[in-house]
Amino acid sequence: MSHIQRSWLEQAGYEVVTTIDEPSARKQIKKTGFDLILSDVRLPEGNGIRLLEWLCKNNMATPFVVMTEYASYADAVNAIKLGAEDYLPKPVHRERLLDLAHSLLNTPSVIRGEKRIFKRVSPQARETERLVRLVAPFDMSVLIFGPSGSGKESIAQSIHQQSDRNGKPFVAVNCGGIPDGLIASEFFGHVKGAFTGADMERKGCFDAAQGGTLFLDEVGNMPLNLQKLLLRVLQERVYQPLGSQKLIKTDVRIIAATNEDMQKLIKEGHFREDLYHRLNEFDLYQPPLCECKEDILPLASFFREQYAGDLRRECEGFTPEAEQMMLDYAWSGNVREMSNRIKRAVLVCNQKLITVTDLGLDTGKPLETTATLRKNTRETLQASKLRKEEEKRQMLVQTLEKTGYNITRTAELLGVSRPSVYALMQKYGLK
């Protein structure tokens, strides 16, 4: 196996051991149990077919894949007859190798912590991970749908890690958390003197993500003026820092995520349809935790072990009542809510087993139906939109007061046009 193939497998999360010839391979196999063996047909000493024959003779049922640049029909047939799982002619392609490894090893989806990996086993999560592996090697824009807290950024990071951009920057931006006046500067940077307070040059998100991946979280909350600027970047692959006449070439992969109904936003005029199709070259759905019952208890144990170590607490498990409560609970906040609940429980737990009381879940509250969850989600989103509208109004008022109601200066500070300022003033009843 070449160094590059070893690197591909290690980047995908596998532990890899390599040897140079058949005798040393036999020693390693005797010494260590392996889940998969990949071997060239021709080796400096011995060959892959003989190694496969030796495995069969010793009743070792380890999955075996033959690779060689000296591909021949006879070798392939012989290897398959001896029990090889597959045959890979060289040059071996990354996506084909990883797909084969994932298939043979039945690799489940993962959630990566700082030090440990949780393997998800639910069919829904594994299907999402299968699609991640499928799209990761190709430089397509991906749009991830799913409820808040379900782990959409983890999916984006997984795509980045399994792509050829792994090792380059992964930059995440919350599109709903940037003040209107700083939008252009945040994404594209600015030169010194571009506006009042711009005392030095500043690089933006596109510059920080150069060569890597730019993750746009809550893309449904992106203001229309930024949507126009972003569309131009995606179409022309260049951007212009605020206050500069220089066009800068960009090389980033865009992955976006949303919990919004994008078709509704498009119909209501809040999101550009042309930008939507640019972002949605490939779509993924990250299911809520309540749809992945098989993951609940293993995930809870994963967080318990992690936080018990972090908080130096002796906590060995859950009471049966606590486990049943977690299975019945709606988890409207998804994986993020579970992480927070388990962290709290580990901290307050005074015995070795976490109880229902330690979890702090509302035991008197009936399990919410899907319809109720959707209603609550709509109400939460509506409240969020009203809050953001008020924040925009306050930003406009403060900027107008700062400039003495100078429309030109206000437009410059907010990064919008003069007509847009007038439109906003009319919208918010300002004179």
Image (tube, helix red, strand yellow):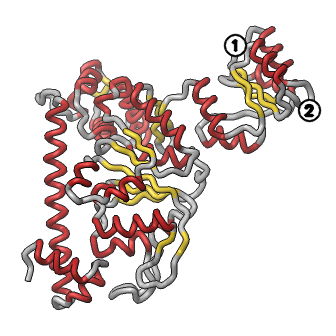
- Label 2 is placed on what type of residue? Pro
Residue bearing mark 2:
44
The residue located at (46%, 33%) in the rendering is 118
Q: Is residue 266 left or right of residue 282?
A: left
Please name the residue shown 16% across and 48% down the image.
380
Q: Label 2, secondary structure: give it.
A: loop
Nearer to me, 335 or 99: 99
Q: Are marks 1 and 2 in contact (CB under 8 Å)?
A: no
Location of mark 1 (residue): 61
Q: Quadrant of residue 243?
A: bottom left
Vertical position of residue 418 compared to residue 334: above or below: below
Q: CA distance from mark 1 to mark 2?
A: 25 Å
Relative image position of residue 255 (x, y in whole percent): 44, 52
* Residue name at image x 18 percent, y 68 percent: 391
Q: Residue at x 82, y 22 (%)?
A: 73
Displayed quadrant of residue 121? top left
Camera sees residue 316:
no
The relative height of residue 24 versus residue 255 in the rendered view (above or below) is: above
What percent of the width, then of the height, locates residue 46?
Answer: 91, 25
**Residue 139 seen in this snapshot:** yes
- Which quadrant would the C terminus be assigned to in this image? bottom left
